[in-house]
Image: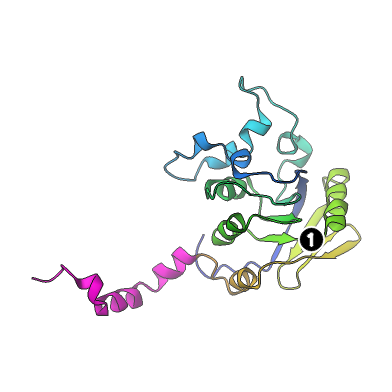
Amino acid sequence: MSVNTVIQNVKGRGVAVPGDDIDTDRIMPARYLRCVTFADIGQYTFQDERFDPQGKEKPHPFNDPKHRGASVLVTNKNFGCGSSREHAPQGILRWGIRAIVAESFAEIFAGNCTAIGLPTVTAQEADVRSLMAYVTDHPEGDVALDVEALTVSFGEKRISVEMRESSRALFLEGSWDSSATLLSAMDAVKEKARKLPYVQWGAQG
């Protein structure tokens, strides 16, 4: 990901993973936190929900061929609770999900999603139920998130959604990637550091 990547719209097929309090250990089991990079972590998303200890596939929406290639995840309350591991949103993103619609999110999880360019929006319970029914019954149908208008469209329906205004501004400005933003301002960072006595302490003499 690079700086100045504006994310105004996300459109793609949807996949519903129903349930409240789906925590980060269910999204990304702890044994996969030892990875050096996130490059291959997407394949382990919901690993213990999708496979038994012998590696046999379980019924799960992410295993269902009709949802292969889906890019909008729909779920219920308090999604991403538990530990603050950034591996959970990284796995979801690298699986191919580009936006998440839920009734609510754990705050740290939502912040970690914003930091990697993965919009998270909340909707009313009835609207989430309607969206889940749509993506289940119409796996080929598109779901469109408009970050600027804060709406999600599917079939003949359009619902209002919410997002923290600070996150919405970062997506619309293309400045959600804080690392890239910092690196792009490296000259200014060095100049500022040069003037800070506690940064220079011990460097002289």
Asked whether 203 falls inside the magenta stretch, the response is yes
Q: Which amino acid does label 1 sit on?
A: Ala
- Label 1 Cα crowd, 10 Å radius (few <14 / some 14-19 / many 20+): many
Looking at the rendering, which quadrant does residue 101 occupy? bottom right
Residue 54 to residue 159: above or below: above
Q: Where is residue 74 in the image (x, y as percent from the top left)?
A: 76, 50
Residue at image position (77%, 65%) is: 161
- Classify the position of the C terminus by image quarter: bottom left
The residue that mark 1 highlights is 123
Q: Position of residue 144 (x, y in %)?
A: 77, 60
- Along the line of sight, the residue nearer the viewer: 73 or 49: 49
Q: Where is residue 87 in the image (x, y as percent from the top left)?
A: 53, 46
Secondary structure beneath label 1: loop
Residue 12 to residue 149: above or below: above
Residue at image position (39%, 67%) is: 183
- Along the line of sight, the residue nearer the viewer: 16 or 142: 16
- Along the line of sight, the residue nearer the viewer: 114 or 62: 114
Say how many tags the image has.
1
Residue at image position (15%, 67%) is: 202
Asked if residue 38 lies left or right of residue 172, the reply is: left
Furthest-right residue in this view:
156
Q: Position of residue 94 (x, y in %)?
A: 58, 47
Q: Main secondary structure of the magenta part?
A: helix
Asked whether 150 falls inside the magenta stretch, the response is no
Colour scheme in use:
rainbow
Q: Which portion, as a residue range, is magenta?
A: 178-205
Furthest-left residue in this view:
205
